[in-house]
Image (tube, helix red, strand yellow):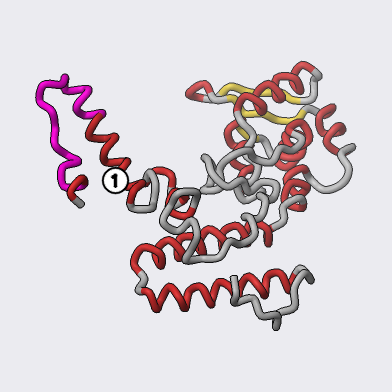
Amino acid sequence: MHRDRFRYIVDTSEPIDTRSKTMRFHGHRHHREHGFGDPRRGFGGGFGRGGPFADGPFPPGPPMPPEPPGFPGHGRGRGRGGRQRKGNVRAAVLTLLAERPMHGYEMIQEISGRTDGLWRPSPGSVYPTLQMLADEGLVASTEEAGGKKLFTLTETGQAEAAKLEGAPPWQQVNDDVDVNAAKLRTAARHLGSAMQQMAHAGTREQKARAVEVLSEARRKLYAILGELDVEEDDTEE
């Protein structure tokens, strides 16, 4: 407490830049000393090595489930971020243009919409593909007001699109996704948030009840995997 009371004292003899860095450092150290690490990094510091909850109050559990294809955990893009699924851009363009003429950006939106955001090809992949198809005589374009190009299939392009077999590329991307795995990760993140709140604001009695709930949930999860009996007593951990 004595040390914390003086953590924001500033030495006016230091340059302004140095003083601001010093204040930021002490502020971050204060967060770490109280168990929740850098606030930009979530609550890992409180439950990791050296944190106040390194040895409790919650028992260790299984690791987070792996990300399913198309559902990476952190990054940009529809709240799921990271790498996205990739499909056959050439086949997708031919299939879309077989439906109706489209602009390049319109094709990107269509593919993204039909995969619920799992696959959104970049302009750097769509427009070179359109140019390649035009060079092959499969696609033609007309320039509209504002410089936008409307792309259509030539007769040769229509014949090429008719040769495509199987499900359209966006359906193949959707079929590759394990929706339940994505839901599992979301549920695990929500549980982690609840654990953080309990550790920070719960009373001693509430934390004891939380340990019982988490221990029971862990037993049931392992029982689903066939590794433990649901009725096995696991309260000694």
Quarter-of-image position of residue 187: bottom right
The spot of residue 161 in percent (x, y) is 83, 36
Tell me where residue 8 sits by quadrant.
Answer: top left
Q: Identify the residue position indicated by label 1 in the image.
A: 30
Q: Residue at x 75, y 19 (%)?
A: 132
Residue at 38% from the left image edge and 44% from the top image edge: 38
Q: Position of residue 4 (x, y in %)?
A: 21, 47
Instruction: Report the amino acid beneath label 1.
Output: His
Q: Which residues are magenta?
A: 4-21
Q: Residues within 10 Å of mark 1 (few under 14, many from 20)?
A: some
**Is residue 122 depicted above or below 15 in this figure?**
below
Where on the picture, by quarter, is residue 131? top right
x%, y% of residue 204? 38, 74
Residue nearest the viewer, comparing 75 with 126: 75
Tally of marks: 1
Tell me, yes or no, whether the highlighted magenta stretch contains residue 16.
yes
The furthest residue to the left: 12
